[in-house]
Image: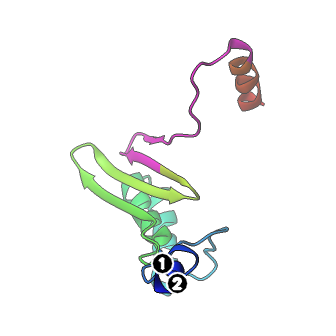
Amino acid sequence: MGFFNKLFGGKSLNEPNINFGRYSDSYRSETQQAAFKRSVDEFEKGKYVAAYHHFFQFLKDDAEDNVKFWEDEKGLQFELLQGSKKIFGFADEQRVEVETKVAIAETLEVDFMKRLMEKIIR
């Protein structure tokens, strides 16, 4: 019977911890709330990298491992998990650049690209 249980519905001992649905940020710690306030304060002073650093501290959930950020010679590098997408980017005092893969296409038809641009512009 053990063989058939393994094949047809025996309980797996190593089930992955996968959360589905929308992620709720309703319950933030006092430390995270303070990080958000510091982020706003730094942003208003024009200290953008410090503001982003505090904002990522606000967003970070250690249990979900949803935010990673570090500083290097380019500025503040970051990776965010948003739904099923991983967002990569960096920020310095002059700009923020963000990249993610949204869709994959074999070919891009001109009419499709035109409609897409029209939707973006609206």
Rate crowding at label 2 as few (under 14), some (14 to 19) or many (20 or more) other CA atoms within 10 Å: few
**Is residue 42 inside the magenta stretch?**
no
Q: Which secondary structure, mark 2? A: loop
Disc 1 designates what residue? 15
Quadrant of residue 23 within the rendered picture? bottom right
User: Looking at the picture, how far across and down is residue 47, in whole percent?
Assistant: 39, 55
User: Looking at the picture, how far across and down is residue 76, in whole percent?
Assistant: 33, 52
Taking the view exactly as shown, the residue that stands out farthest to the front is: 1
| Residue 47 visible (yes or no) | no
| Span shown in magenta | 87-111
Taking the view exactly as shown, the residue that stands out farthest to the left is: 73
Q: Which mark is residue 11?
A: 2
Residues under numbered marks 2 and 1 in contact, where contact means CB atoms less than 8 Å apart: yes
Which quarter of the image is occupied by the C terminus? top right
User: Looking at the picture, how far across and down is residue 46, in whole percent?
Assistant: 44, 52
Give the color scheme: rainbow, by chain, secondary structure or one colour.
Answer: rainbow
